[in-house]
Amino acid sequence: MKTRQFLYALPLLLASCNSYFDPEGLYPEEKLVLYCMPNPNQDSIVIQLSKSVPVTATGTPPLGIPKANIDFMVNGEKQHVYWNENRTENLPPQCYYVLNNLKEGDKIEIFAGSRDLTPVTSSTVIPTSFPLEDIELAIKPEDTPKLQFRVTFRDNASTDDYYGIRIVEKVITEHKYDDENGVPCDTTVEITSVLNFDVTDEPLLNDRVGLDATFELDYDYYQNLYIWTDEKIPGKEYTLRLTSSYTPDYESDEASEYGYYKAIHLYKVYLYHLSPEFYRYLKSVNDISNNELGQNGLAPIRSHYSNILNGFGILGGCQFTESSWLPQPQP
């Protein structure tokens, strides 16, 4: 299956949350900034290239760098790199792209150079698909019932693995009624949103230590993409538990004075297997965003992780598994 809305937007979302300088090194010169997240689930591989703004300068970096020299290689074989000037249905503006024919285990290498800027290089490997075994939705009985997603998977004991999950909710409402003139009306509305979870029951995600644990500071995940490693579960079967609020589906009586009304909730689960570089970059984004003590001058502020040699940004491989739309359990 293909999905574009989040994956094509991800390089832009990640790029927009960063300032392109290293606060530890305070680089005075411009450097190339490269974002590329290749995975076999897309039709095209987007490469976004820009340049940093030195700490001594003002303004924002340009959207893209046309006429750059880019080599994109898969297992040592050079691929044709295209330039996209204007936004299309599938591509952002001012970007480069490669037609996708990737599979797990492919080694990706990138070289990029432009004018008088130092060339940059990087590499990554496409991981295997997410080792999913089962997805279950259940009602967690409490004073106020909760909806719990239980995702069972089996980790590979021979590798260090990095995972992620993102769940989208779709609420479909149907309303049939007569307007003030007695004319029958029938409206259907669909609203989608990304779920935010309570991870109290999930030790892989609820791992606050030190001052975070002392002050019970919450840890937020960027764009509600929850990530974890297999460090605590090497080679084991494990069930991840994520809890959210629960609103039962509803259907009114046809004879209701307000007309017929129906609301149902559906959920789609995206499961990611990330390369080590991609995970480390996302982890650094989360850590910086959650560093409230650092933002108030009470702790050091770290720079974003980058595997772009002589520049900034990220080249990170991934694969994702997408479920069908799943109905929620009924009480």
Image: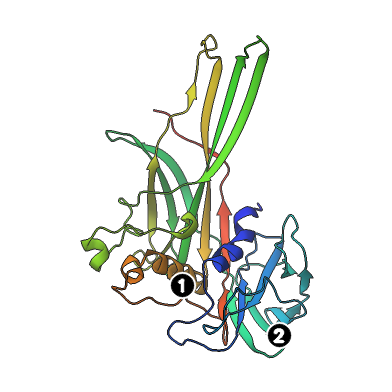
Where does residue 285 sit, x and y in percent of width and height? 46, 68
Whether residue 172 sits left or right of residue 279 in the image: it is right
Q: Position of residue 162 (x, y in %)?
A: 46, 66
What residue is shown at x 66% (from left), y 80% (from top)? 110
Label 2 to label 1, Cα distance in Å? 27 Å
Q: Are marks 2 and 1 in contact (CB under 8 Å)?
A: no
Q: Quadrant of the image for the C terminus?
A: top left
Q: Is residue 161 visible?
A: no
Label drawn at residue 114 = 2
Give the residue number, with chain letter if any, for mark 1. Answer: 280
Q: Earlier in the sequence, mark 2 or mark 1?
A: 2
Label 2 or label 1, whichever lies nearer to me, is: 2
As drawn, 63 above or below 325: below
Q: Residue furthest front?
A: 58
Q: Label 2: how many residues lie within 10 Å, few (<14), some (14-19) or many (20+)?
A: some
Say which quarter of the image contains residue 107: bottom right
Residue 306 at x, y percent in the picture: 51, 78
Work out whether 254 lies above or below 21.
above
Q: Residue furthest left?
A: 214
Please name the amino acid that badge 2 sits on: Ser
